[in-house]
Image: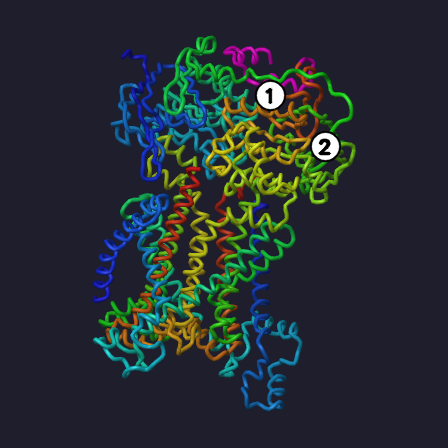
Amino acid sequence: MSSDVLLQIRDLQIEGRAGEDWLPIIKGVNLTLKRGEVLGLIGESGAGKSTLGLAAMGFARDGCRISGGEINFDGIDLRTASERAKRNLRGQRIAYVAQSAAASFNPAHKLIDQYCEVPVLGGMSRSKAADEAVTLYRKMQLPDPEDIGFRYPHQVSGGQLQRAMTAMAMACHPDLIIFDEPTTALDVTTQIEVLAAIRDIVRDFNTAAIYITHDLAVVAQMADRIKILLRGDEVEEADTRAMLAAPKAEYTKSLWAVRSFTRPEQPPAEGAPLVSVQGVTAGYGKAQILHDVSFDIHPGRTVAVVGESGSGKSTVARVITGLLPPREGQVVFDGQPLPPDYRARTRDQLRQCQMIYQMADTALNPKLPLRELIGRPAQMYLGLKGRALDARVRDLLALIELEPDQYIDRLPSELSGGQKQRIGIARALAAEPRLIICDEVTSALDQIVQEGILKLLDRLQREFGLAYMFITHDLSTVRAIADDVVVMQLGRVVEQGPKPEMFTPPHAPYTDLLLSSVPEMDPDWLTRLLAAR
Amino acid sequence: MNVLIFLVLAIAASIPLSYAFRAGLVRVLPHEKALVARDMPLTAAFGIMVIGVYVIVAFAAPLLAPFPERAVVGSQFQPWDSTYLLGTDRLGRDMLSRLIYGARNTVGIAFATTALAFVVGALLGIWAALRGGWLDQLLSRFVDALMAIPSLIFSLLLLTIFGTSVLTLILVIAAVDATRVYRIARSVSQGVVVMDYIEAARLRGEGNWYLIRHEILPNALAPLVAEFGLRFCFVFLTISSLSFLGLGIQPPTADWGSMVRDNATLITFGDMTPLMPAGAIALLTVAVNFVVDWQLYRASGLKEQG
Amino acid sequence: MHAVLMMILQRLGLGILTLFVVSVVIFGATELLPGDLASSLLGQSATPETVAALRQQMGLDQPAPVRYWTWLTGVVQGDFGVSLATRRPISDMMSMRLGNTVFLALYAAAIAVPLSLVLGILAALWRNSLFDRVANAGALSAISFPEFFVAYILIFLLAQSGVFPSMVRISPAMGLTDKLYVTFLPALTLTLVVTAHMMRMTRAAIINLMASPYIEMARLKGVSPLRIVLRHALPNALAPIINVVALNLAYLITGVVVVEVVFVYPGLGQLMVDSVAKRDIAVVQAIALIFASAYVLLNLTADVLSTLTNPRLMRRK
């Protein structure tokens, strides 16, 4: 073993407790990391990437155990090392940056106190540690670096907390940092800043890192090498450029192929709109969320409403469905103004506009079988009963590509995430609506599953001439499925128009920022972008 | 020290017994339920076994008891012998028979009270969570005010006013406990009401009754069942305490709380017979608590996995 | 700081409002009395004239709000009216007993609070260990025991042999050591029952806290277990622990009633039970008000204290 190898993991096996039994989570993974090298760890949910990252620190969460293999960090065997020896490594030589900085900072202490804890335990004087903290805060481009440390976590924004956590991890100049999805919870425009700061500081300190993420484009910017995990097994490992250029394994190729689906372009909309949102202003209590929002949705077309968190895009959906009556303005459906409150709408008005939710887990009653979940709207709106109802439910299941006999009596808990989302679609279809509002329907799903859902929605749209309102923060989804785009920021429509127009300059400044912030599968994208800005 | 030795022996005996009971359950039950039974802790098996015995005793009391409930059959405070297995009480009634009938009276009344408190409290709680707005505020503030008075104290106050009969006892305790059930039911339902599937059902145009029956109740059931167990323990202990204080179930009805009170003088003479009805109360409460604890653990474990 | 002061004032205001509502409920409950207080007091043999005379004497001929106001202003000045059974001023009957009850409750609390916090924290730290399982099963059993069962077992074990007295006779002249000695059994009974509750709740609160991501972060920073508990968990555990303690001290209030009866302890609880048996509504009303006020004040104190320990509330954005 050459001395520039920092971390060596061989045939690692980790098990997790399931009741009385232990089930494998990591099934014999090897990993080698040189000093100063950044390894990207890619996988979908349940691939075991966080578990592997923590194991690199000799750590297993409660309910998990390392059951085989070896973990060697710079000549120290982490499987046999004493707890005390491992404690001395952690924080000092191996540091960790968690996904949710907001939950991982202790709410009871100031940021700088939490920063200083490890250096002071390591023997540094408190004032020196505090001075270094300010230097690092400045390096991480935190605003007001002199004072920000004296705030409590809840007084600092999410993107800033994530950078403060990276600074904290850097405190003792560790040899290795584990980044566990550090930007997943952030908006795209915030993500850029954090990515840039992390990349620079890791390079400046020549720190080795394991960068865990599910986002290929992000890892392309950050990692020298990429390792791909699937259900606890290693699929493939290669240099970043080599892997992007020529993925070998089938699974890797399928990951790459995800972004290939695009709905064929449609001619611009003509004729009367199905839904017209006219000058809507709305809010809760004193807070005004929407300001004078107007746009149209035409039959058979998909309008994507795009924006970051706090843009008011979901609130628009609540106004259209009647959950939040607007203060000013109105929603016109097929030429008729809709009553502002859903309770005042007729059953037929309710039927024509259906909704699909982001989290299928909370959108489907876990105690009802699919037969009732899908059948209820058909029974209620169309008066179907007995045989006819049963046949209709079976048709709908076939329509969403689930085998009726096999699935009709299942509960939602017996389905995968993607299948649950398909049930949400079937439930909406059962009402035979003309408009379906899709609220971030793919953002909780793995990329391959997303693809399937988007294709299904596209097919259904062509088959039934449905109009979609697609609420999303993800511009690649917009590229794939939209006909028209509405960009929102802070409760206002910034720009709107047909998709081809929206994706060619000139843009409104915010649209420009949003578009340019979406990571691309090009290792030089971030460098170029930062140079251009 | 007899009591300690007795307790140690009882615990030592109950371990193999619960073990055998659990093994028996695994054999008898259909496959799926047998799996659940196999994984249940010994304490829960013990709890189920004890509850089963109490239920049998309560239903079969006239068959099991050697003497009638209220008849004076011997002289006062007779010691244990072959006729009066546990001796007689201060009026000369058979202790064992009264202990057996007590299962019927004390447990039955506590169960009826809990059920009443539950129907009223849970329905109001779910309704308040579903409706929200001023109705919810009004009900909740009213319940808050009632709950600012400790429950035993409030029960004592109400019993002073309405007098002590079994009916008033049931109504008073049920009313006081319904406030606690309301709180739980409301908070559990609020957790359900914010779910998207409720919003979806509302947007579909479903009525309140459908929402309660099909959407809320099935999802609120597990915590409510656990709460029913806990509430039962609480009501059972409250009624026993009131009877012990002479303010609950009135003589000549055989009841465990008042049996302790009536015969307490024996304890200072070193006779442990009066501890038996108290022990009977404790044993049932322990059993129910063990089962509830297991159910709560199961519910939380399932949630973590899902 | 200004916002916190406002919040505390708000809580105090709410507390006073609750007290007011409680007094209305307690007073109003007696209005539900079937028939008339005076006729039920005089019994079957009373003539209409004597009833009318008593009604006037008791002020029953006045409308309810007026009577409530008279009662409330009296209570605020320490005048609870006269007992229906003995015709003695209620405040005289209660003064000694109130002190005794408070003494017993504090005695029990002084043992139970530190004991249960230590046991609860240890059980949480050594989760699923033998200690945790035994402590848990023990606590669950103790919760399930009626207070009088615990009391009689203790009498059976400790008083029968003459180590401690089973009936408590105390006088104001007694020294503190003697007083602690004679009230040991009732205090121990209360301690056992309350400790079980408090231990379980402390354990649950700590386990909940130890599952937070920031505790995992501290472990991944290489912080020692002791330091994790003291520096990372404890500051955040204060609020839940304060609430657990308050809840259980409030529980002492009701526990005291039964225990006082068992040990013939001259406290408020015993007086209340006697008065319920005699249907002396005036005394029951007064004692219920005192117990309820103590309960409200305890919860109020806990509320204010846990506000003060919460950095999120103390330092707004």
Q: Chain of mark 1?
A: A
Residue B158 coordinates in the image, percent (x, y): 52, 71
Q: Type of residue at label 2?
A: His
Q: Which span of residues is magenta-colored?
A: A504-533
Q: SS at mark 1?
A: helix
Q: Residue at x 41, y 47 (%)?
A: C205
Do marks 1 and 2 share a subunit?
A: yes
Residue A78 coordinates in the image, percent (x, y): 28, 25
Quarter of the picture containing the C terminus of chain A is top right
The nearer-to-camera label among 1 and 2 is 1
The image quadrant of residue C174 is bottom left
Mark on residue A291? 2
Whether residues under marks 1 and 2 lie with C-beta atoms below 8 angstroms apart, the answer is no
Q: Is A107 covered by the magenta stretch?
A: no
Residue A131: in sight, yes or no? no
Residue A259: in sight, yes or no? yes
Q: Residue at x 28, y 23 (%)?
A: A69
Q: CA distance from mark 1 to mark 2?
A: 23 Å
Residue B182 coordinates in the image, percent (x, y): 53, 56
